[in-house]
Image (spheres, rainbow, N blue to C red):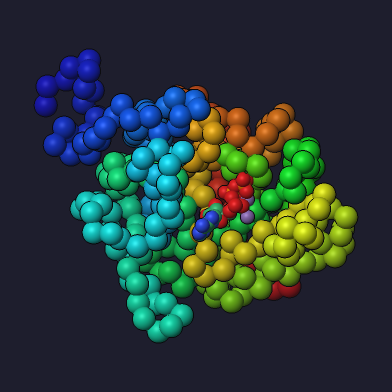
Amino acid sequence: AEVTPEKPADAPAADDAVAISNRDRVVFPDSGQTKGELADYYAAIAPLMLPFAARRPVSLVRCPQGRARKCFFQKHDSGSFGDAVHHVPIAEKDGGTEDYLFVEDTRGIMQCVQMGTIEFHGWASRSSDVEAPDRMIFDLDPDEGLDFGDVKSAARDIRDRLADLGLTSFAMLSGGKGVHVVVPLTTGHSWETHKDFAKRFAEALSMAEPDRFTATMSKAKRKGKIFIDWLRNQRGSTAVLPYSARARSGAPVAVPIAWNELKGMENAHPYSIDEAKTLLDRAASKSLHGWGFAEQRLPDI
Ligand code: ATP
Ligand code: MN
Ligand code: MN
């Protein structure tokens, strides 16, 4: 193929690229980013995102008219995504089966973006074996008004407690208010075991330090505390995927960070979709090398 400065040899062929309509539509009214800019972000970041996002059931936050208008959480195909958005049948509690969505390449991500997707959320299991969870997430949800410093020290304490159990964990800034502590796991245990471990871990923490932590969702019981949201670890739950954009003010993104970087962070949304280049450079740095990967089993506790 001919190589031109506009079109490097390794760019996808034009007939393979997903056409993005309404590129000039403003999706983030308070900061001004358009659908075209969101698409450019995802096209650039897809190689970083796919190791975490590919081949797992996803839920999408779609805001076809921009984030200030109606957004909805979509788990099932509405029939209009395109050939790179695949289906995986999953058994429902009521005995029926529903088709969930998964993508496996940049085209899949871009077809979702074309359909107005801002956020990508993923199951904690792969579409090839949805009954086998492969990562645990402790989603730290601070009560309103709590200092981000408290969230940071909570995340570090959770890291240390997990390390005591022989588990390596990683920190992700959600792009919103909190930090997700991510524990990659080798498959081989059930959802029941997965959820029980997460629940007991969160409850043990809240019992040891009831002034700092709560393991119950109730907002009333969260006053001045951090809710350790272990409910992300139930079959059917999702968590926002690394490098997903957020449908929030300023077009922030969820970003993996190294533990030694966490100290310097002032909030959970330091990067936006305007910074794909910075995020690509960061991901190539030594401190982020291997983020999110570890061969480890859930211990018996
Ligand atoms: P923050 O740091 O601001 O809490 P977050 O992504 O952790 O950001 P949460 O409200 O704590 O947001 O939600 C945790 C996860 O729960 C989300 O990442 C998402 O995957 C899931 N979730 C949130 N809202 C819904 C919803 N309406 N339906 C299904 N799942 C949802
Ligand atoms: Mn959260
Ligand atoms: Mn939560």
Q: Residue at x 39, y 77 (%)?
A: 91
Q: Residue at x 23, y 59 (%)?
A: 79
In this rendering, the answer to whether 270 lies above or below 125 is above
In this rendering, the answer to whether 97 lies above or below 277 is below
**Figure quadrant of the C terminus:** bottom right
The single residue placed furthest to the top in the displayed view is 5
Depth order, front residue of 217/191:
217
Residue 294, given in percent of the width and then of the height, sits at 57, 53
The single residue placed furthest to the bottom in the displayed view is 95
Q: Residue at x 62, y 64 (%)?
A: 231
In this rendering, the answer to whether 290 lies above or below 187 is above
Task: State left or right for residue 222 relative to residue 135.
Answer: right
Which quarter of the rendered image does ligand 3 occupy? bottom right
Residue 253, given in percent of the width and then of the height, sits at 52, 37
Count of numbered circles in the view = 0
Residue 158, given in percent of the width and then of the height, sits at 75, 53
Depth order, front residue of 94/47:
94
Residue 162, given in percent of the width and then of the height, sits at 73, 57
Task: State left or right for residue 276 relative to residue 262.
Answer: left
Task: State left or right for residue 170 relative to residue 248.
Answer: right
Q: Quadrant of residue 3?
A: top left
Residue 183 can be seen, yes or no? no
Q: Residue at x 35, y 57 (%)?
A: 102
**Figure quadrant of the N terminus:** top left
Residue 235 can be seen, yes or no? yes
Depth order, front residue of 167/133:
133
